[in-house]
Image (spheres, grey):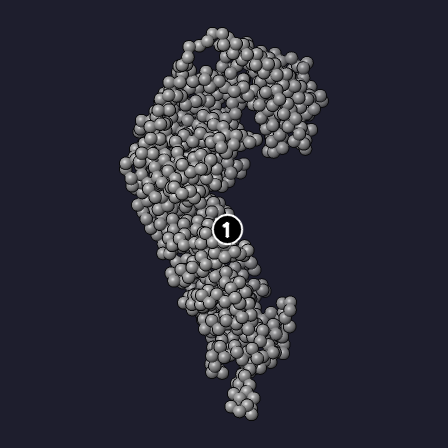
Amino acid sequence: MQAGETLFFLFSRRSGILAASDMSWTAEQVIALAPDASAAKSGKDLSVPRKWKTLGMEPNCAWGTIQGSGQDPYQTCVDLGGLAFKCTCPSRKFPCKHGLGLLLIVAQQPGAMTEKQPPAWTTEWIARRSEKERKSAKAGTPEAPPDPEAEKKAAAAADKRAASREAKVSAGLDELGIWLGDLVRNGFATLPGKPSSFWETPAARLVDAQAPGLARRVRALDGISTTGERWPTRLLREASLLHLVREGWLRITSLPPATQADIRTVIGFTANQEEALEQAGVQDQWLVVGQCVEEDERLKVQRSWLFGAASRRFALSLSFSASPNQPLDITLAPGTVLDAELVFFRGAWPLRALVKQRQRSPTTTAVGLPHETIATANALAAEAFTANPWLERIPFGLAAVMPSRRAHGWIVRDAAGCCLPLRISDADAWKLVALAGGCPMALAGEWDGEQLRPLSVWAEGRFLRV
Amino acid sequence: MNFEELTQVALLGTERQPLAAPQGSRPLDQLQAQVDVNHREEALLTSAALSGLHERIGCLPSLDTGPLSDQCPPEELAHMNARAGSLLLRLLSGEYTVLLPEVLELAAKAKQIALPEALPSLLSLGSGKPELREAILPILGARGRWLAAQNPEWAYVGGATSEDEAIWQVGEPPARLIFLRRLRRISPARAREVLSSTWKEETPEDRSRFIAAIEIGVCVEDEPFLEAALDDKRKEVRRTASALLGRLANSGLVKRMTDRARPLLKYIPGETGSLLRLKKGRPAVIEVTLPAGCDKAMQRDGVEPKPPQGLGEKAWWLIQILEFVPLELWTNDWRISPADLLAASLQSEWKKELFEAWTRAAIRQRSADWADVLFGAALDGKKFDKFEGLLSAMFRTQRELRLSELLAANDAKTRDFHGTLIAHCPGEWSVQFSRTVLAWLRRLSAEPSNDWQLRNQIKDFVPRLAPSILPEVPAGWPIEAQGWEFWSKGAEEFFAVAQFRADLRAAFVNEHSNT
């Protein structure tokens, strides 16, 4: 495949790449919504039409009733447009097994959704949801006229808080500087065999200094120093980037605003969502090209990578969950398309974004993958790292690559012969080989500067998560 | 300085290794030249940041010239539908593994193949479980065979893809075994010839694996080969050969065993007592003469000289000889029924040994009548280890009748091991017997119990149930009864497996569910 050649995936039931509003869900996409493995299993067990008392569907929603352990049957419905679940069961999981089971039937046996007229409890709920959406869309305008006195006070208090935090961060970064200095003065050769407290202590100090982003990166150094070849190279790279944060912080006001924002993000300042939402966004058909969930301490972080059909740019949507009761964002199902306005957080290479507004109208637009050869993807990465050296991963959407095994590990290779090493288990790698069948396939993943972690593939017209 | 040089400094530590001032005229060198080398640590980290970024941004993707896999040939069979595919993936991921053999069979019967994403786990399943290999092969499709050829761990598939006997010469042992077994099914004689042609060059391990394949369609023509294998150096090979010869009713080995056995047993008919008890009656008895020795010829035929613990050596030899003797020999020679013969054996000093020997013989020779009679004795004697073999040797109607009677009688003597009996009753059960077992389970679960073992076992009954009664499974359970608290866990699992099995069967029958 020549550079720049575009591969388009048409949205149809047959191709398996689906627009959410087209109601063509695949079982995989539904399972991906489950909050945990046990909910996924229970949901699968309930994806049997005969277990349901009633089942019905219209273009915007699906509903069903099912006998549970309570006296009255549970009423379950799914808003197919905005993808939301509602169930009268007492489960605190979200979506619950009934919602998952119902959507699985929609995905696999839509013929079983025999009722066509939604019952009152369904229409009421959908109506309430639309109402809420309208309200939240209007919420931008404050209702009461602002009180200048109170505003002044609040602003002064906020400034004070901000100044105190910045002082703490400065002190924390000074300490980090000393620790990093010790690290390179004594030499990395002394590191193997250090107890985990060696890394944990400075990380904890950074937490105290309200720099959680740096704390996480320091903690991750422990992993680097104990495994893999070339660990000194990787350790020095990461240590030098931490050093660069400190250097940047010392002269932050002299830096361009975008880089200031990047440094604050690395340190762990929370991005200002309201400020971001005030900007005009990018309206587009966004294809959810890949998703993964990682657990850091007790916090679950879900990364969803989007790619815009017209804007030809990537966006990263993050969702966090600190407990099972706090669900991750389930509306961005991999392989689906959302017609939405996204706003990007400020940065020298803006990537992280929020969904500002989402259309419920059906979309049937074709969205292509970023049509990259490995060389163009690499050029994109160079551009990104130039703008923001602290980026930990960059989304790659490769149009046509073949997986292959080499002595040093798995790679993907494109028609030009360029290759990228993969970060992948053997089992998953063989799955890629099986799906490709010896032909080039489209693959989306995360590039960390050294390895590509595959997240999704499109092979033979089907979308699959890795 | 490039990043590699800087890493060397960092590895040793700036304390020992000062940072050299950069020389050169590249833009990077000029940037690095601005770094104050007097602050060694900061200088190193700053230089590293510059150089690391420089390298990361400037690096080009590597070129690869290694071989790529060929394009996979097109499929000849249809894929299973998405529903069946997702159920198969769940089974492969470790859910409801008792149903794995069934899904393989269902797919093979429907002439459908697995979806590509399931292939690696399916192939690995075969690597781990050789007994499933042949069942896996038909659903691999062209893609699965193509994939297996790329991973040595899946080499066993090679034996199934090729009609070419060359695989026998060049293949890996697992592939050769599958090839041999397949050939044995198509042409037993050719398979034997192929095996004989390389027999002398095979390793002992391979010989013992390969000779076991002769089991498929074993017949008189195999005798010379098997007879020769009795002189093999490897014990497993000799054991397999003698076991297979034992299944050929007219083989030399069976004749030799029969000749050894005849003088050892003598049947003395009973005498009825007179009406007036003037003369005492005497029951029939079997007189046993233990074998005098275990000579070379006996050992060659498979008689193990050293007894297991708790058994005298002569008694041990007796058991092993009798095991090979066709059971009809005794009933024909002495013109009595198996039941009478067993009754007579009970009068003997060696009744335990005779029971053991005949049970082994009945299982080995699949003698249904004998198994039926011996099963009664096994019940009385609580010989749990014999239940499975004897039940398997009976005809289905026979064993189902036996067990149904036992369950219905609900006798205190046998009640405690009804679960064990059901667990050892091989499938597939008839509709009627499936219902009998269900009814028994429902009755059982009303009563309090602490039979954890049975509770955990119930779910394993599911694959044996007649498929048509699966929808009946969840109804009619004593959920209000006292015993339910204990049994519900096992019963819920039972329902879940039954539901899954019903879904699985529906997915292969109902093609409309595929969208």
Image height check: is B199 above or below B99?
below
Task: Please name the residue shown 51% across and 40% down the image.
Answer: A426
Image height check: is B254 above or below A254?
below
Nearer the observer, B228 or A199: A199
Check disc 1 and report the residue beneath it: B485
Q: Is residue B37 left or right of residue A79?
A: right
Spot occupied by residue A374 in the image (x, y as percentages of width and height): 44, 28
Nearer the observer, A435 or A144: A144
Nearer the observer, B24 or A195: A195
Identify the subunit bearing mark 1.
B
- Give, as a three-letter code, the residue at label 1: Glu
Image quarter in which the C terminus of chain B is found: top left
Residue A396 visible here: no
Image height check: is A227 above or below B2?
below
Q: Secondary structure at mark 1?
A: helix
Image quarter in which the N terminus of chain B is found: top right
Spot occupied by residue B222 in the image (x, y as percentages of width and height): 46, 68
Give residue A209's quadrant in the image: top right
Q: How many marks?
A: 1
Task: Please name the residue shown 63% across and 18% down the image.
Answer: A172
Spot occupied by residue A87 in the image (x, y as percentages of width and height): 40, 36
